């Protein structure tokens, strides 16, 4: 008899290819309809409905109604963290060049990992914040310094609101394409949210990849010293 949560049950839910595709489609934090998810799952709408029911029962996704439409999203940020970690493990089983060669280059450059930045963008932001003494980040955990709190406040981020969110405040997240850490947690989400509010990035259709605007190019260079 196994002790603790049933790992096999969660593994079986994720292990089905169609359900894995559904979960991957939701990794950018957006809510999608069943018909949209059927496209990503590459199965019929009827089959997709069965998969969505199983994922909902397993508390991996959550359903919400808006008018006559039903939308599905990942149940918690921790689900996104788990999926990104699994992708990192999967990529480590083959050569790095082979693992990333099949990717859309835009996905590796800038993408979302649930609600925070990943790819070269996410790693570069984390590196800059650490180099400037704004952030302490290691595989063991993460923390903002007083200098970092002041900097992010000046950038327009409400850290008080971020602290009230029911989730880890500042944590490392292993980037599966770069094999390095980027910034997750409430702080990472707040940083991404602020950049979206400033119209630095736009989301690409049917992808977690992000397109950087001219405002984003200037902002990253002037405020963070980053050029992608």
Image (tube, rainbow, N blue to C red):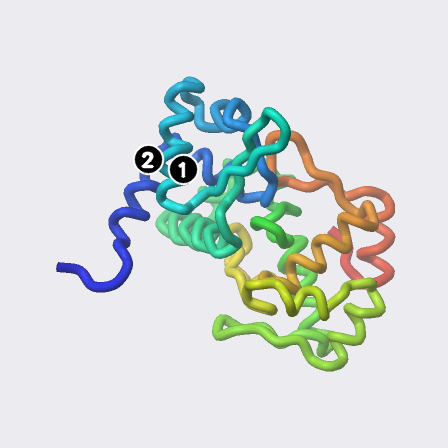
Where residue 64 appears, as percent x and y from the top left, is 55, 37
Residue at 49% over, 71% down = 139
Q: Which mark is residue 16?
A: 2
Where residue 142 appears, as percent x and y from the top left, is 57, 73
* Label 2 – label 1 distance at C-alpha: 6 Å
Q: Quick one: 179 or 219, which is closer to the camera?
A: 219
Residue at 55% over, 30% down = 70
Mark 2 burial class by Cα count in 10 Å: few <14, some 14-19, many 20+: few
Q: Is residue 219 above or below residue 41?
A: below
Mark 1 burial class by Cα count in 10 Å: few <14, some 14-19, many 20+: some
Where residue 68 appears, as percent x and y from the top left, is 60, 25
**Residue 37 falls left or right of residue 134:** left
Find disc 1 in the rendering and name its residue.
Answer: 20
Cβ atoms at labels 2 and 1 below 8 Å apart:
yes
Q: Quadrant of residue 157?
A: bottom right
Quick one: SS at disc 2? loop
Residue at 20% over, 63% down = 3
């Amino acid at each position: 008899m196994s002790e603790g949560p049933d790992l096999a049950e969660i593994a079986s839910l994720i292990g089905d290819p169609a359900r894995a595709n559904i979960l991957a489609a939701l990794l950018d934090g957006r809510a999608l309809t069943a018909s949209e998810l059927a496209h990503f799952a590459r199965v019929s709408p009827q089959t997709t409905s069965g998969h969505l029911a199983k994922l909902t029962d397993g508390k991996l996704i959550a359903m919400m109604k808006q008018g006559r439409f039903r939308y599905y999203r990942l149940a918690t940020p921790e689900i996104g963290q788990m999926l990104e970690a699994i992708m990192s493990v999967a990529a480590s089983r083959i050569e790095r060049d082979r693992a990333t060669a099949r990717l859309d280059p835009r996905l590796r450059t800038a993408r979302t990992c649930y609600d925070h930045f990943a790819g070269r963008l996410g790693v570069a932001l984390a590196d800059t914040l650490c180099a400037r003494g704004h952030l302490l980040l290691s595989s063991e955990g993460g923390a903002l310094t007083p200098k970092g709190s002041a900097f992010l406040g000046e950038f327009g981020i409400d850290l008080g609101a971020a602290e009230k969110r029911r989730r880890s405040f500042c944590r490392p997240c292993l980037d599966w394409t770069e094999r390095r850490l980027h910034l997750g947690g409430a702080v990472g989400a707040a940083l991404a949210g602020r950049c979206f509010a400033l119209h630095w990035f736009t989301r690409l259709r049917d992808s977690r990849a992000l397109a950087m605007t001219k405002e984003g190019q200037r902002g990253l260079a002037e405020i963070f010293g980053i050029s992608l």
